[in-house]
Image (spheres, rainbow, N blue to C red):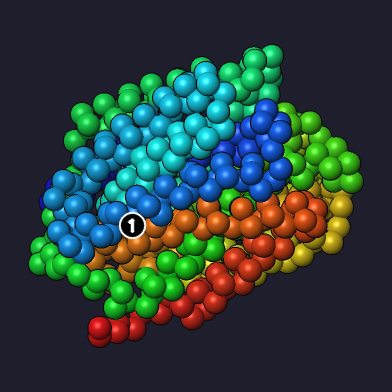
Amino acid sequence: MQNKKNYTSAFISLTVLFFMWGFMTVLNDILIPYLKGVFELNYFKAMLVQFAFFLAYFIGSAVYFIFSVTKGDPINKIGYKNGIVAGLIVSAIGALLFYPAALFHMYGFFLSALFVLGLGFTLLQISANPYVAILGSEESASSRLNLAQGFNSLGTTIGPVIGGFLIFTFFKNAEGSDAVKIPYLVFALLFVLVAVFIGKTKLPVFTNSEEIVKGFGAFKYPQLVFGMFAIFMYVGGEVSIGSMIINFLHLPEIGGMTETQASTYVAFYWGGQMIGRFLGAISLSEIKLKVFKYFLMFIVPVVSFITVGLITNFDTANIFGILLIINYLAFVFAGKRANRNLYVFAGINIVLLAIVLNTTGQLALWSLVGIGLFNSIMWSNIFTLAISGLGKYTSQGSSLLVMMILGGAILPVISGLVADSFGIQMAFIVPVFSYVYLMFYGLVGYKQNKIEL
């Protein structure tokens, strides 16, 4: 194992990766209203975009898990670096497939391209998340993963703005579905370039000193089993909300916005995750001086409010400012305990969804957008709580957690069915159940009590 002095450069290399897959994943929120219009789809059929993409996570992770329990963990054989490079190449192939999908103007072809893209991201998730977690002490794993996820959220923040501009404005007059041809060719090239960059970067090599045991040993750990359902609920709730924002803000009683205008608020939703993740990285860090820590944390929401206020206007952004203050106070209250952060933030999101379901106008708009602030630390905290104490089963456990990203395929489709039947506003009842479960996991489900199988 290499010295800690090498970990910084390795971590910086991986943040580029987290940024890239965040950027690409959130473009689905732009594709949904775009393809819905191009192919004249209802909400259920439009949500098949997320179904195809996130189904790939489940199938890819299931194959990985089956291989690990029969032949031994692949990551321990090929290494994290090779797993990351393989994921980038598969992702590039998926992005390239958008060109023939647009050329033949086939919705099914688009879904197939998204499935391949999702397979590539599956490899990246299985390889990169645990790798970031072990690039240092176990105590600071949540902080490190929050920081990496912060750069992932930087990608999800910029993605809707750039994607919305390219698809709804720059290539607006393209025939049929041609507006996505050139952008996704560029994305494919970027994946290849990042693969070359990672391939040539010297990354620390970690070897597992424990015996690699085949079988279903990971299921002995209840924190992992409950964590699998927590990932399912978290991703499903998060994606359901992001997928509905543009169509929701198009409603006259909410905002009456165009797709281009609404895509800015998609950026604020995912940008809230970035704000919260950087706050979480500071809150869960090993900074000893509390006054300095809280000062650093305070700077993040102040800068964020000024930025949002300048982009929109300060009168309408006041509600977001209040949510930023609540987010800051929630971090101060929860401290460094990952489980407490989880149940407190889930509880706040339940309240915000109740407001979205029962109000209109600016209050409903900003309550929905503000949920991103409190989604922020959930992935990294669930992930680190779930794999904590797994030892030789860490990579196997990671594949099981990534498998449950399946929630991003299932819950948006259910939300689409509810939207078609009862209206898009009522569809936000679906993620309420997600956050109720996440409260349970943060309060009880994360506890480590090994079960003998």
Mark 1 belongs to which amino acid? Ala
Secondary element at image label 1: helix
Q: Is residue 314 left or right of residue 89?
A: right
Q: Going 41% across and 50% down the picture, which residue do you hit?
A: 57
Q: Which residue occupies the foreground of this view, 135 or 113?
A: 113
The residue that mark 1 highlights is 62
Q: Categorize mark 1 by other alpha carbons within 10 Å: few (<14), some (14-19), many (20+).
A: some
Q: Image check: 452 left or right of 143?
A: left
Would you say 372 lies left or right of 2 here?
right
Measured as percent of width and height from the top left, residue 51 is found at: 53, 48
Query: How many circles with numbers are drawn on the protein?
Result: 1
Task: Evaluate whether residue 154 shows in this view.
Answer: no
The residue at the point 25 percent across, 85 percent down is 452
The picture places residue 34, in percent across and down from the top left corner, at: 66, 31
Q: How far from the left and from the top, in percent, is residue 135?
A: 27, 52
Residue sitting at x 37%, y 78%: 222
Q: Which x, y percent locates residue 360?
A: 87, 52
Residue in view at x 31 percent, y 74 percent: 219
Q: Residue furthest right?
A: 253
Residue 234 in view in this figure: yes
Q: Is residue 317 above or below residue 236?
A: above
Image quadrant where one finds the C terminus:
bottom left
